[in-house]
Image (tube, rainbow, N blue to C red):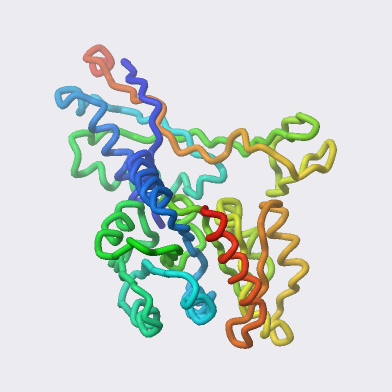
Amino acid sequence: MSIITIERKVLEKNDEIAQRNRAFFRDRGIFVLNLVSSPGAGKTSILEKTFQELRNSLNIAVIEGDVQTDLDAQRVAQYGVPVVQIVTMGGCHLEAKLVQDAMESLNLEKVDLLFIENVGNLVCPASYDLGEATKVVVLSTTEGDDKPLKYPGMFRNSSILILNKTDLIPYVNCNLDELKRNALQINPALRIFEISCFTGAGIPEWCDWLRKKDASGL
Amino acid sequence: MHELGIAQNILEIVQQAVPDGQKPAVRKVRIRVGQLSGVVPDSLDFCFSVILNESQMPKARLAIEQVPTISQCRDCAHRFQIEDLAFVCPACKSTNLELVSGKELEIVEIELADDRDEAI
């Protein structure tokens, strides 16, 4: 037997491109958030609410990722927000190269805030750095309070947790305190926002945080 | 199910590291997979064996070392293995922890058979 020692990261190619994306965003002062969740948790609805609150004060752009269709990009475009749709054709997550390609189709000259809406999936997107400032994991109350324990990677790799659909708590089997306890057990540093895209509750606090983040030059 | 993409990345790196003439001799690719890496070892193993059919390394197999999640407390310096995904120091109950291992997804080494090995 002979041995070749290599000691290389399997995702090194993705990580290299992600670092280039990150440097690009940093040089231009663009704050980039990678939104991750299971399908239907409300990522696009949160974006719509965020546009309504912030589009007059901040320049926002969006990169949408979906397995099929440009339905989300159509929703975003209705708000006059520049958007590029990535269709992964079956791929279960976005990779840094896909984001890099999408950036070429967006005019990011004056953009303050860029949202990357990942493919709905609580597993795979956790492994791929896209060059974002941070991942924002969205969890809706209808999914149940045990999800942070079942999908720890995603909650470990995010610094923000948005709990959506809080208006449905009276009707679903979800204990909000238990949910938060589970999430903080996996990641004690998580910052948590409780919102309802239906009633608008919690949206101002989330948008205030975004404004402050932008002003801090991150 | 992103293990297929990961398997393709591994194959690509191995193909770069091994000269063409030696590729058929590749027997083992040793990799380290952390508990928190989000990769399912069995699934990765299966995907790797499938894509090998189109490579010059039909006899290559993955040897997967699973790396436990180890943390060190920043407050009391206690080092411990995370059980049941509780990121709390068992010694002082602090949550101010540094992750020492668990996120690995690395190729360590490649084993090639020599002519001698083949004769046996």
> Which image quadrant for residue B48?
top left
A193 or B36: which is nearer to us?
A193
Q: In the rendered view of the protein, which quadrant contains the N terminus of chain A?
A: top left
Viewer can see residue B46:
no
In the rendered view, does B91 fall on the left or right side of A93? right
Residue A182, position in %: x, y? Answer: 71, 60
Q: Is residue A102 above or below residue A8?
A: below
Residue A69, position in %: x, y? Answer: 30, 77
> In this view, which residue lies farthest toward the left?
B21
A117 or A2: which is nearer to us?
A117
Residue B33, position in %: x, y? Answer: 49, 38
Residue at (25% x, 41% y) in the render: B52
Viewer can see residue A196:
yes
Q: Is residue A111 above or below residue A196?
A: above
A86 or B85: which is nearer to us?
A86
Residue A208, position in %: x, y? Answer: 62, 69
Residue at (57% x, 66% y) in the render: A211
> In this view, which residue lies farthest toward the top?
B116
> Which image quadrant for residue A196?
bottom right
Residue at (71% x, 66% y) in the render: A179
A163 or A79: which is nearer to us?
A79
> Which image quadrant for residue B92?
top right
Q: How many marks?
A: 0
Residue at (70% x, 49% y) in the render: B84
In the rendered view, does A204 fall on the left or right side of A41? right
Q: Is residue B68 above or below residue A80?
A: above
